[in-house]
Amino acid sequence: MRQYAISGDASQLRFGIVVSRFNHMIALRLLEGCTRELEKRGAGADDIHVAWVPGAFEIPLAARALARTGRYDAVVTLGAVIRGGTPHFDYVCRGVTDGICEVMRDTSIPIAFGVLTTDDVEQALARAGGCEGNKGEEAARAAVEMARLGPQLAEPPGSAVAGPIGSTRGKAPR
């Protein structure tokens, strides 16, 4: 049985982060948690690039643009969609979720989903550094793990398993 190494080492990796300005206070807390976690795991500040977009619905387009550059080992998406009194919440949540899935499928770049979908502001705050932790940190951990796992999964059967350090993904010059 072939098993793949799990690594949380972010050194030598580059990350694009897309953040929604809508619900800015919550998004900022998610971003702070995300960048703090990436740096804690060894990512350099110069290897973390942030793109702000107007709202959550615009996140997939920016994530696609970043993923297509080939400069990033993973992209993290952050924002908050809070339920209101209309069906708008459902449409935005579906659009963001489906859009991010399409970007991952079309580009083969890992996209970590850190977009909160909550019933109210209190739930969002709880998940953005409150009693429920910081989902930005969780998205950062997922991005690092998937960026390390991808090259291992690309190894042909019977070859030596790629180690968790030193991604083999082709990168554009820094």
Image: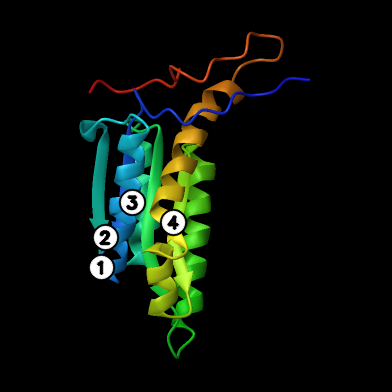
Residue at image location 42% in from the left, 86% down from the top: 84
**Residue wearing tag 3:** 33
Answer few, some or many: residues within 10 Å of disc 4's Cα (few below 14, many 20 plus, some between 14 and 19): many
Write down the quadrant of residue 3 in the picture. Answer: top right
Q: Can you give x and y, in whole percent of width and height, for residue 66 in the image?
A: 33, 42
Question: In the image, which is nearer the foreground, mark 1 or mark 3?
Answer: 3
Rounded to the nearest angstrom, the CA distance separating label 4 from label 3 is 8 Å
The location of residue 165, given as percent across then percent down, is 46, 18
Q: Residues within 10 Å of mark 1 (few under 14, many from 20)?
A: some
Q: Where 2 sits versus 65, above or below?
A: above
In terms of secondary structure, where does tag 3 sit? Answer: helix
Name the kind of residue labelled 4 in the image.
Lys
Q: Are marks 4 and 2 in contact (CB under 8 Å)?
A: no
Question: Height in image: 153 above or below 160?
Answer: below
Residue 15: % across, % down = 34, 37
For the residues labelled 1 and 3, the Cα–Cα distance comes to: 14 Å
* Sequence-earlier tag: 1 or 3: 1
Query: Which of pointers 4 and 3 lies earlier in the amino acid sequence?
Result: 3
Say if mark 4 contacts mark 3, CB within 8 Å. yes
Where is residue 164 shown, x and y percent of the image? Answer: 51, 20
Label disc, if present, on residue 8 of the rendered structure: none
Residue 24 is labelled as 1
Helix, strand or loop at mark 4: helix
